[in-house]
Image (tube, rainbow, N blue to C red):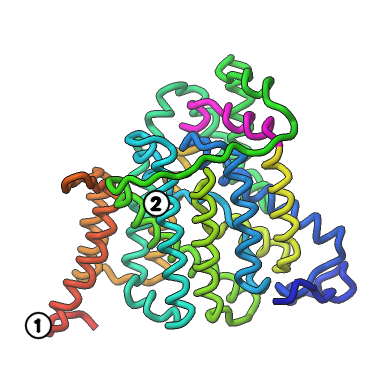
Amino acid sequence: MRLGWKLHGDGARITPGEVVAPDERLSWPRTIGIGLQHIVAMFGATFLVPALTEFDPATTLFFSALGTIAFLLITGNKLPSYLGSSFAFIAPVTAATASGGQSVALGGILATGLLLAIVGVVVHFAGPRWIQVAMPPVVTGVIVALIGLNLAPVAWTNFQVAPLTAVVTLASIILIQVLFRGLLGRLAILLGVVIGYVFAAVRGEVDFSQVEQAGWLGLPQFVAPSFDPGVLGLFLPVVLVLIAENVGHVKSVAAMTGRNYDPLTGRALLADGVATTLAGLGGGSGTTTYAENIGVMAASRVYSTAAYWVAAFGALALSLSPKVGAMIASVPAGVLGGATTMLYGMIGILGARILVQGRVNFSDPVNLTTAAVPLVIGIADFTWTAGDLQFGGIALGTAAALVIYHVMGAIGRWRGTARP
Protein backbone atom coordinates (compact mmCIF):
# COMPACT_ATOMS: atom_id res chain seq x y z
CA MET A 1 0.00 0.00 0.00
CA ARG A 2 1.24 3.47 -0.92
CA LEU A 3 0.16 6.38 1.30
CA GLY A 4 1.92 9.05 -0.76
CA TRP A 5 0.19 10.97 -3.56
CA LYS A 6 1.50 12.46 -6.79
CA LEU A 7 0.84 16.14 -7.29
CA HIS A 8 -1.74 16.66 -10.05
CA GLY A 9 -0.36 19.18 -12.50
CA ASP A 10 0.62 22.34 -10.69
CA GLY A 11 -1.59 21.40 -7.74
CA ALA A 12 -3.92 24.33 -8.37
CA ARG A 13 -5.85 23.68 -11.58
CA ILE A 14 -7.67 20.76 -13.18
CA THR A 15 -7.62 20.72 -16.96
CA PRO A 16 -11.10 20.36 -18.55
CA GLY A 17 -11.87 16.70 -19.15
CA GLU A 18 -9.41 15.51 -16.50
CA VAL A 19 -9.92 14.37 -12.90
CA VAL A 20 -7.62 14.16 -9.89
CA ALA A 21 -7.13 10.41 -9.52
CA PRO A 22 -7.19 8.57 -6.17
CA ASP A 23 -3.37 8.38 -6.13
CA GLU A 24 -3.02 12.11 -6.89
CA ARG A 25 -3.73 15.27 -4.94
CA LEU A 26 -3.93 19.01 -5.34
CA SER A 27 -1.92 21.35 -3.09
CA TRP A 28 -2.46 20.59 0.60
CA PRO A 29 -4.54 23.73 1.32
CA ARG A 30 -6.91 22.77 -1.53
CA THR A 31 -6.93 19.11 -0.45
CA ILE A 32 -7.81 20.12 3.12
CA GLY A 33 -10.60 22.34 1.81
CA ILE A 34 -12.09 19.47 -0.19
CA GLY A 35 -11.73 17.18 2.82
CA LEU A 36 -13.75 19.66 4.89
CA GLN A 37 -16.42 19.62 2.16
CA HIS A 38 -16.61 15.85 2.59
CA ILE A 39 -17.20 16.33 6.34
CA VAL A 40 -20.05 18.73 5.65
CA ALA A 41 -21.53 16.42 3.00
CA MET A 42 -21.60 13.36 5.26
CA PHE A 43 -22.52 15.14 8.48
CA GLY A 44 -26.26 15.63 7.94
CA ALA A 45 -27.03 12.02 7.08
CA THR A 46 -24.55 10.56 9.56
CA PHE A 47 -25.99 12.41 12.56
CA LEU A 48 -29.62 11.67 11.62
CA VAL A 49 -29.17 7.95 12.25
CA PRO A 50 -28.10 8.28 15.92
CA ALA A 51 -30.72 10.99 16.39
CA LEU A 52 -33.41 8.57 15.20
CA THR A 53 -32.08 5.48 16.98
CA GLU A 54 -31.07 7.25 20.22
CA PHE A 55 -27.43 6.21 19.84
CA ASP A 56 -24.75 8.58 21.09
CA PRO A 57 -23.90 10.91 18.16
CA ALA A 58 -20.29 11.42 19.26
CA THR A 59 -19.72 7.65 19.38
CA THR A 60 -21.27 7.27 15.94
CA LEU A 61 -18.98 9.96 14.51
CA PHE A 62 -15.98 8.33 16.21
CA PHE A 63 -16.61 4.94 14.60
CA SER A 64 -17.54 6.56 11.30
CA ALA A 65 -14.09 8.19 11.22
CA LEU A 66 -12.38 5.00 12.39
CA GLY A 67 -14.28 2.99 9.76
CA THR A 68 -13.21 5.37 7.00
CA ILE A 69 -9.57 5.00 8.02
CA ALA A 70 -9.98 1.20 8.02
CA PHE A 71 -11.60 1.35 4.58
CA LEU A 72 -8.74 3.37 3.10
CA LEU A 73 -6.15 0.99 4.59
CA ILE A 74 -7.89 -2.23 3.56
CA THR A 75 -8.47 -1.03 -0.01
CA GLY A 76 -4.81 -0.09 -0.29
CA ASN A 77 -5.52 3.65 -0.37
CA LYS A 78 -6.85 3.16 -3.91
CA LEU A 79 -10.61 3.61 -3.52
CA PRO A 80 -11.97 6.98 -2.27
CA SER A 81 -14.90 6.66 0.13
CA TYR A 82 -16.34 7.99 3.35
CA LEU A 83 -18.15 5.48 5.58
CA GLY A 84 -21.12 7.15 7.26
CA SER A 85 -24.13 5.80 9.15
CA SER A 86 -26.27 3.46 7.06
CA PHE A 87 -30.01 4.18 6.95
CA ALA A 88 -30.61 0.46 6.42
CA PHE A 89 -29.91 -0.11 10.13
CA ILE A 90 -32.59 2.29 11.40
CA ALA A 91 -35.53 -0.13 11.37
CA PRO A 92 -33.74 -3.17 12.89
CA VAL A 93 -31.94 -1.03 15.48
CA THR A 94 -35.20 0.65 16.51
CA ALA A 95 -36.95 -2.72 16.88
CA ALA A 96 -34.03 -4.37 18.68
CA THR A 97 -33.60 -1.43 21.07
CA ALA A 98 -37.30 -1.51 21.95
CA SER A 99 -37.16 -5.22 22.78
CA GLY A 100 -33.74 -5.60 24.40
CA GLY A 101 -31.97 -2.27 24.69
CA GLN A 102 -29.06 -0.67 22.87
CA SER A 103 -26.56 -3.43 23.64
CA VAL A 104 -28.78 -5.99 21.89
CA ALA A 105 -29.01 -3.71 18.85
CA LEU A 106 -25.21 -3.44 18.85
CA GLY A 107 -25.02 -7.24 18.83
CA GLY A 108 -27.09 -7.20 15.63
CA ILE A 109 -24.81 -4.56 14.08
CA LEU A 110 -21.76 -6.62 15.04
CA ALA A 111 -23.23 -9.78 13.48
CA THR A 112 -24.05 -7.84 10.30
CA GLY A 113 -20.49 -6.54 10.07
CA LEU A 114 -18.98 -9.99 10.53
CA LEU A 115 -21.20 -11.51 7.84
CA LEU A 116 -20.42 -8.66 5.43
CA ALA A 117 -16.69 -9.13 6.08
CA ILE A 118 -17.01 -12.84 5.27
CA VAL A 119 -18.85 -11.99 2.04
CA GLY A 120 -16.01 -9.59 1.20
CA VAL A 121 -13.40 -12.31 1.61
CA VAL A 122 -15.41 -14.68 -0.60
CA VAL A 123 -15.88 -12.01 -3.27
CA HIS A 124 -12.18 -11.13 -3.19
CA PHE A 125 -11.20 -14.70 -4.06
CA ALA A 126 -14.23 -15.79 -6.13
CA GLY A 127 -14.89 -12.52 -7.98
CA PRO A 128 -17.94 -10.21 -7.90
CA ARG A 129 -19.86 -11.96 -10.69
CA TRP A 130 -21.82 -14.26 -8.35
CA ILE A 131 -23.30 -11.22 -6.54
CA GLN A 132 -24.88 -10.03 -9.78
CA VAL A 133 -26.34 -13.49 -10.35
CA ALA A 134 -27.71 -13.88 -6.81
CA MET A 135 -28.86 -10.27 -6.44
CA PRO A 136 -29.94 -8.79 -9.80
CA PRO A 137 -31.35 -5.23 -9.89
CA VAL A 138 -34.93 -6.35 -9.33
CA VAL A 139 -33.94 -7.99 -6.03
CA THR A 140 -31.63 -5.25 -4.73
CA GLY A 141 -34.01 -2.50 -5.87
CA VAL A 142 -37.03 -3.90 -4.09
CA ILE A 143 -35.05 -4.60 -0.89
CA VAL A 144 -33.78 -1.02 -0.72
CA ALA A 145 -37.27 0.32 -1.48
CA LEU A 146 -39.06 -1.72 1.17
CA ILE A 147 -36.57 -0.65 3.86
CA GLY A 148 -37.41 3.01 3.26
CA LEU A 149 -41.16 2.44 2.99
CA ASN A 150 -41.20 0.19 6.06
CA LEU A 151 -39.99 3.19 8.09
CA ALA A 152 -42.87 5.46 7.06
CA PRO A 153 -44.84 4.96 10.33
CA VAL A 154 -41.75 6.11 12.30
CA ALA A 155 -41.73 9.38 10.38
CA TRP A 156 -45.44 9.90 11.05
CA THR A 157 -45.00 9.23 14.78
CA ASN A 158 -42.40 12.00 15.06
CA PHE A 159 -44.34 14.30 12.72
CA GLN A 160 -47.41 14.26 15.00
CA VAL A 161 -45.42 15.49 18.02
CA ALA A 162 -45.01 19.00 16.55
CA PRO A 163 -46.76 19.22 13.15
CA LEU A 164 -45.93 22.89 12.50
CA THR A 165 -42.21 22.39 13.17
CA ALA A 166 -42.26 19.27 10.99
CA VAL A 167 -43.91 21.16 8.12
CA VAL A 168 -41.38 24.02 8.38
CA THR A 169 -38.50 21.51 8.33
CA LEU A 170 -39.91 19.57 5.39
CA ALA A 171 -40.76 22.71 3.42
CA SER A 172 -37.24 24.06 4.00
CA ILE A 173 -35.68 20.88 2.64
CA ILE A 174 -37.90 20.97 -0.45
CA LEU A 175 -37.25 24.65 -1.18
CA ILE A 176 -33.49 24.42 -0.68
CA GLN A 177 -33.31 21.66 -3.27
CA VAL A 178 -34.86 23.87 -5.97
CA LEU A 179 -33.36 27.21 -4.88
CA PHE A 180 -29.72 26.13 -4.80
CA ARG A 181 -27.35 24.09 -6.92
CA GLY A 182 -24.09 22.33 -6.15
CA LEU A 183 -23.08 21.60 -2.57
CA LEU A 184 -25.88 23.65 -0.97
CA GLY A 185 -28.49 21.72 -2.92
CA ARG A 186 -26.97 18.39 -1.87
CA LEU A 187 -27.01 19.53 1.77
CA ALA A 188 -30.74 20.22 1.69
CA ILE A 189 -31.57 17.79 4.51
CA LEU A 190 -28.83 19.15 6.79
CA LEU A 191 -29.80 22.79 6.13
CA GLY A 192 -33.50 22.00 6.49
CA VAL A 193 -32.82 20.40 9.87
CA VAL A 194 -30.86 23.49 10.96
CA ILE A 195 -33.78 25.75 9.96
CA GLY A 196 -36.26 23.46 11.69
CA TYR A 197 -34.06 23.34 14.78
CA VAL A 198 -33.92 27.15 15.01
CA PHE A 199 -37.70 27.34 14.51
CA ALA A 200 -38.24 24.70 17.23
CA ALA A 201 -35.88 26.55 19.59
CA VAL A 202 -37.85 29.78 19.15
CA ARG A 203 -41.04 27.86 19.98
CA GLY A 204 -39.43 26.38 23.11
CA GLU A 205 -39.35 22.79 21.82
CA VAL A 206 -35.59 22.24 22.29
CA ASP A 207 -34.14 21.09 25.63
CA PHE A 208 -30.69 22.68 25.95
CA SER A 209 -29.94 21.34 29.45
CA GLN A 210 -27.70 18.50 28.24
CA VAL A 211 -25.91 20.84 25.82
CA GLU A 212 -25.11 23.28 28.61
CA GLN A 213 -23.78 20.51 30.86
CA ALA A 214 -21.63 18.82 28.21
CA GLY A 215 -17.93 19.65 28.01
CA TRP A 216 -16.09 20.80 24.92
CA LEU A 217 -13.61 17.91 25.03
CA GLY A 218 -14.06 14.31 26.11
CA LEU A 219 -14.19 10.71 24.96
CA PRO A 220 -17.35 9.27 23.36
CA GLN A 221 -19.60 6.94 25.34
CA PHE A 222 -18.65 3.34 24.51
CA VAL A 223 -21.22 0.57 24.96
CA ALA A 224 -20.53 -3.18 24.80
CA PRO A 225 -22.76 -5.40 22.62
CA SER A 226 -24.84 -8.36 23.74
CA PHE A 227 -26.53 -11.02 21.64
CA ASP A 228 -30.16 -12.04 21.40
CA PRO A 229 -30.87 -14.64 18.68
CA GLY A 230 -34.44 -13.34 18.58
CA VAL A 231 -33.42 -10.08 16.89
CA LEU A 232 -30.64 -11.27 14.58
CA GLY A 233 -33.20 -11.97 11.86
CA LEU A 234 -33.94 -8.24 11.77
CA PHE A 235 -30.36 -7.41 10.79
CA LEU A 236 -29.34 -10.06 8.25
CA PRO A 237 -31.29 -8.45 5.35
CA VAL A 238 -29.19 -5.31 5.88
CA VAL A 239 -26.18 -7.27 4.60
CA LEU A 240 -27.80 -7.44 1.16
CA VAL A 241 -28.34 -3.67 1.15
CA LEU A 242 -24.73 -3.00 2.17
CA ILE A 243 -23.51 -5.32 -0.58
CA ALA A 244 -25.58 -3.42 -3.15
CA GLU A 245 -24.39 -0.04 -1.86
CA ASN A 246 -20.72 -0.99 -1.85
CA VAL A 247 -20.84 -2.57 -5.28
CA GLY A 248 -22.66 0.51 -6.57
CA HIS A 249 -19.99 2.74 -5.04
CA VAL A 250 -17.18 0.82 -6.74
CA LYS A 251 -19.00 1.05 -10.08
CA SER A 252 -19.67 4.78 -9.63
CA VAL A 253 -16.03 5.64 -8.87
CA ALA A 254 -14.91 3.50 -11.81
CA ALA A 255 -17.30 5.27 -14.17
CA MET A 256 -16.22 8.74 -13.05
CA THR A 257 -12.47 8.08 -13.09
CA GLY A 258 -12.32 5.80 -16.13
CA ARG A 259 -10.54 3.09 -14.16
CA ASN A 260 -11.48 -0.53 -13.46
CA TYR A 261 -12.02 -1.04 -9.73
CA ASP A 262 -13.80 -4.44 -9.91
CA PRO A 263 -10.77 -6.18 -8.34
CA LEU A 264 -11.30 -3.98 -5.25
CA THR A 265 -14.96 -5.00 -4.77
CA GLY A 266 -14.13 -7.75 -2.27
CA ARG A 267 -11.82 -5.45 -0.31
CA ALA A 268 -14.51 -2.75 -0.21
CA LEU A 269 -17.04 -5.21 1.22
CA LEU A 270 -14.49 -6.52 3.72
CA ALA A 271 -13.59 -2.97 4.75
CA ASP A 272 -17.21 -1.97 5.34
CA GLY A 273 -17.71 -5.22 7.25
CA VAL A 274 -14.73 -4.42 9.48
CA ALA A 275 -15.98 -0.85 10.02
CA THR A 276 -19.48 -2.04 10.93
CA THR A 277 -18.02 -4.69 13.26
CA LEU A 278 -15.95 -2.06 15.06
CA ALA A 279 -19.06 0.11 15.43
CA GLY A 280 -21.00 -2.81 16.90
CA LEU A 281 -18.23 -3.49 19.38
CA GLY A 282 -18.27 0.01 20.86
CA GLY A 283 -21.65 1.70 20.41
CA GLY A 284 -21.66 3.19 16.90
CA SER A 285 -24.11 2.87 14.02
CA GLY A 286 -23.42 0.44 11.18
CA THR A 287 -21.63 2.05 8.25
CA THR A 288 -21.82 2.21 4.47
CA THR A 289 -20.24 4.09 1.57
CA TYR A 290 -21.84 7.50 1.11
CA ALA A 291 -23.55 8.81 -2.00
CA GLU A 292 -23.34 12.34 -0.57
CA ASN A 293 -19.55 12.21 -0.89
CA ILE A 294 -19.82 10.80 -4.40
CA GLY A 295 -21.61 14.07 -5.20
CA VAL A 296 -18.72 16.13 -3.81
CA MET A 297 -16.28 14.17 -5.96
CA ALA A 298 -18.41 14.56 -9.06
CA ALA A 299 -18.71 18.32 -8.51
CA SER A 300 -15.03 18.91 -7.72
CA ARG A 301 -13.58 16.21 -10.04
CA VAL A 302 -11.22 15.38 -7.18
CA TYR A 303 -11.11 11.66 -6.31
CA SER A 304 -7.96 11.86 -4.22
CA THR A 305 -7.96 9.58 -1.19
CA ALA A 306 -5.92 12.30 0.55
CA ALA A 307 -9.13 14.33 0.94
CA TYR A 308 -10.76 11.39 2.70
CA TRP A 309 -7.91 11.11 5.18
CA VAL A 310 -8.56 14.77 5.97
CA ALA A 311 -12.30 14.05 6.35
CA ALA A 312 -11.68 11.02 8.59
CA PHE A 313 -9.41 12.89 10.99
CA GLY A 314 -11.73 15.90 10.95
CA ALA A 315 -14.69 13.69 11.94
CA LEU A 316 -12.53 12.07 14.61
CA ALA A 317 -11.83 15.52 16.09
CA LEU A 318 -15.55 16.36 16.11
CA SER A 319 -16.36 13.09 17.88
CA LEU A 320 -14.15 14.16 20.79
CA SER A 321 -16.47 17.06 21.61
CA PRO A 322 -19.36 15.94 23.88
CA LYS A 323 -21.01 19.33 23.33
CA VAL A 324 -21.35 18.61 19.59
CA GLY A 325 -22.90 15.23 20.41
CA ALA A 326 -25.30 16.79 22.92
CA MET A 327 -26.35 19.41 20.37
CA ILE A 328 -27.15 16.68 17.84
CA ALA A 329 -29.04 14.66 20.45
CA SER A 330 -31.18 17.70 21.30
CA VAL A 331 -32.86 17.79 17.88
CA PRO A 332 -36.60 17.58 18.74
CA ALA A 333 -39.09 15.04 17.39
CA GLY A 334 -40.90 17.56 15.18
CA VAL A 335 -37.72 18.34 13.25
CA LEU A 336 -36.95 14.64 12.87
CA GLY A 337 -40.50 14.02 11.67
CA GLY A 338 -40.15 16.55 8.88
CA ALA A 339 -36.68 15.39 7.85
CA THR A 340 -37.51 11.68 7.87
CA THR A 341 -40.65 12.19 5.82
CA MET A 342 -38.27 13.22 3.06
CA LEU A 343 -35.41 10.90 3.98
CA TYR A 344 -37.35 7.64 4.19
CA GLY A 345 -39.14 8.47 0.96
CA MET A 346 -35.76 9.06 -0.69
CA ILE A 347 -34.63 5.59 0.39
CA GLY A 348 -37.74 4.12 -1.20
CA ILE A 349 -37.13 6.06 -4.41
CA LEU A 350 -33.49 4.98 -4.40
CA GLY A 351 -34.78 1.43 -4.68
CA ALA A 352 -36.94 2.49 -7.62
CA ARG A 353 -33.89 4.13 -9.18
CA ILE A 354 -32.01 0.82 -9.02
CA LEU A 355 -34.93 -0.81 -10.85
CA VAL A 356 -34.90 1.88 -13.55
CA GLN A 357 -31.13 1.88 -14.01
CA GLY A 358 -31.17 -1.93 -14.16
CA ARG A 359 -33.83 -1.72 -16.89
CA VAL A 360 -36.00 -4.25 -15.11
CA ASN A 361 -38.67 -5.61 -17.43
CA PHE A 362 -41.95 -5.76 -15.51
CA SER A 363 -43.76 -7.50 -18.33
CA ASP A 364 -41.86 -10.56 -17.10
CA PRO A 365 -44.02 -12.12 -14.34
CA VAL A 366 -40.91 -13.19 -12.44
CA ASN A 367 -39.75 -9.57 -12.08
CA LEU A 368 -43.26 -8.30 -11.43
CA THR A 369 -43.95 -10.79 -8.66
CA THR A 370 -40.48 -10.36 -7.17
CA ALA A 371 -41.20 -6.65 -6.74
CA ALA A 372 -44.90 -6.73 -5.89
CA VAL A 373 -45.11 -9.25 -3.05
CA PRO A 374 -42.08 -8.09 -0.97
CA LEU A 375 -43.17 -4.44 -1.17
CA VAL A 376 -46.53 -5.21 0.43
CA ILE A 377 -44.85 -7.39 3.05
CA GLY A 378 -42.40 -4.61 3.89
CA ILE A 379 -44.87 -1.71 3.89
CA ALA A 380 -47.47 -3.58 5.96
CA ASP A 381 -44.66 -4.88 8.22
CA PHE A 382 -45.72 -8.54 8.18
CA THR A 383 -44.34 -10.43 11.18
CA TRP A 384 -43.65 -14.09 11.79
CA THR A 385 -42.62 -15.65 15.09
CA ALA A 386 -40.77 -18.96 15.30
CA GLY A 387 -40.00 -19.82 18.91
CA ASP A 388 -37.78 -17.06 20.29
CA LEU A 389 -37.16 -15.63 16.82
CA GLN A 390 -39.33 -12.89 15.35
CA PHE A 391 -39.00 -11.73 11.78
CA GLY A 392 -40.42 -8.37 10.70
CA GLY A 393 -41.42 -6.89 7.36
CA ILE A 394 -37.90 -6.10 6.19
CA ALA A 395 -36.56 -9.60 6.89
CA LEU A 396 -39.61 -11.34 5.44
CA GLY A 397 -39.73 -9.02 2.43
CA THR A 398 -36.04 -9.63 1.72
CA ALA A 399 -36.48 -13.40 1.98
CA ALA A 400 -39.55 -13.21 -0.27
CA ALA A 401 -37.66 -11.25 -2.94
CA LEU A 402 -34.81 -13.78 -3.05
CA VAL A 403 -37.01 -16.87 -2.91
CA ILE A 404 -39.60 -15.66 -5.44
CA TYR A 405 -37.01 -14.54 -7.98
CA HIS A 406 -34.87 -17.66 -7.90
CA VAL A 407 -37.68 -20.23 -7.49
CA MET A 408 -39.89 -18.73 -10.19
CA GLY A 409 -36.85 -18.39 -12.47
CA ALA A 410 -35.86 -22.02 -11.93
CA ILE A 411 -39.40 -23.28 -12.57
CA GLY A 412 -39.70 -21.08 -15.66
CA ARG A 413 -36.47 -22.48 -17.11
CA TRP A 414 -37.57 -26.05 -16.30
CA ARG A 415 -40.97 -25.56 -17.94
CA GLY A 416 -39.62 -23.52 -20.80
CA THR A 417 -41.85 -20.55 -19.92
CA ALA A 418 -39.07 -18.19 -18.82
CA ARG A 419 -38.89 -14.89 -20.70
CA PRO A 420 -35.59 -14.35 -22.58
Q: Position of residue 386 (x, y in %)?
A: 16, 48
Residue at (58% x, 14% y) in the render: 204
Cβ atoms under marks 2 and 1 closer than 8 Å: no
Q: Nearer the viewer, residue 56 or 263?
A: 56
**From what the image shows, is residue 166 above or below residue 288?**
above
Which comes sooner in the sequence, label 2 or label 1?
A: 2
Disc 2 residue type? Gly
Q: Nearer the viewer, residue 309 or 168?
A: 309
Q: Residues within 10 Å of mark 1 (few under 14, many from 20)?
A: few
Residue range corresponding to the magenta coloring: 321-337
Disc 1 residue type? Arg
Indicate left or right for 295 with 414 as reference: right
Q: Main secondary structure of the magenta part?
A: helix
Q: Which mark is residue 200?
A: none
Q: Is residue 195 magenta?
A: no
Looking at the rendered image, the quarter that the C terminus falls into is bottom left
Q: Quadrant of residue 296?
A: bottom right
Instruction: Return the residue at label 2.
Output: 348
Instruction: Return the residue at label 1.
Output: 415
**From what the image shows, is residue 134 above or below residue 40?**
below
Residue at (59% x, 34% y) in the render: 193
